[in-house]
Image (cartoon, rainbow, N blue to C red):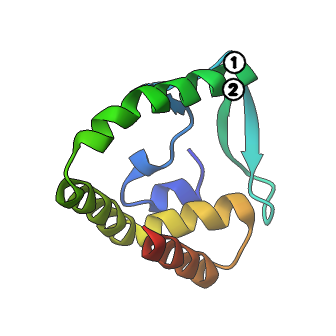
Amino acid sequence: MNSWATALKDGGLLRRDAYIDGAFEGGERRFAVTDPASGEIVAEVADMSSQDADRAVAAAAKAQPGWARRTAKERSDLIRRWADLMMAAQDDLALILTSEMGKPLGEAKGEIAYGASFI
């Protein structure tokens, strides 16, 4: 395990596979994501194909009518919960972002908060 990854409160936030149609998939190939500051491998992640992207788009299109049938209040509650979960995991998400992008931790925390503000 990466030395920084042991600092995560929720190691499940560091995902290595692609989420398609309700399931995480590893794909046929993987590639290394490295920490630009240390050169350490952050994770080996799924290298998905264009066909996998097509499947993901088709799955999203299939799911959209169910989402549209939800009331505005239901959608709002779910989206608010997503933003709340992001903020609750801000430290872990910022550590992952810092490790894969090399940006300062404080800036990464701000980026997580900024992203959550749009949700």
Towards the viewer: 57 or 48: 57
Vertical arrangement, residue 36 with respect to residue 104, above or below: above
Q: Residue at x 37, y 60 (%)?
A: 9
The amino acid marked with disc number 2 is Met
Q: Which residue is labeled 1 in the image?
A: 51
Percent across and percent down for residue 10 are 37, 54
Q: Tell whether 76 sits left or right of 118.
A: left
Quadrant for the C terminus, please: bottom left
Q: Which residue is labeled 2 in the image?
A: 48
Total numbered labels placed on residues in the image: 2
Residue 112, label in figure = none
Assign a secondary structure to mark 1: helix
Say whether residue 48 is visible.
Answer: yes
Q: Which quarter of the picture shows residue 32?
A: top right
Percent across and percent down for residue 46 are 65, 30
Packing grade of label 2 (10 A; few <14, some 14-19, many >=20) is some
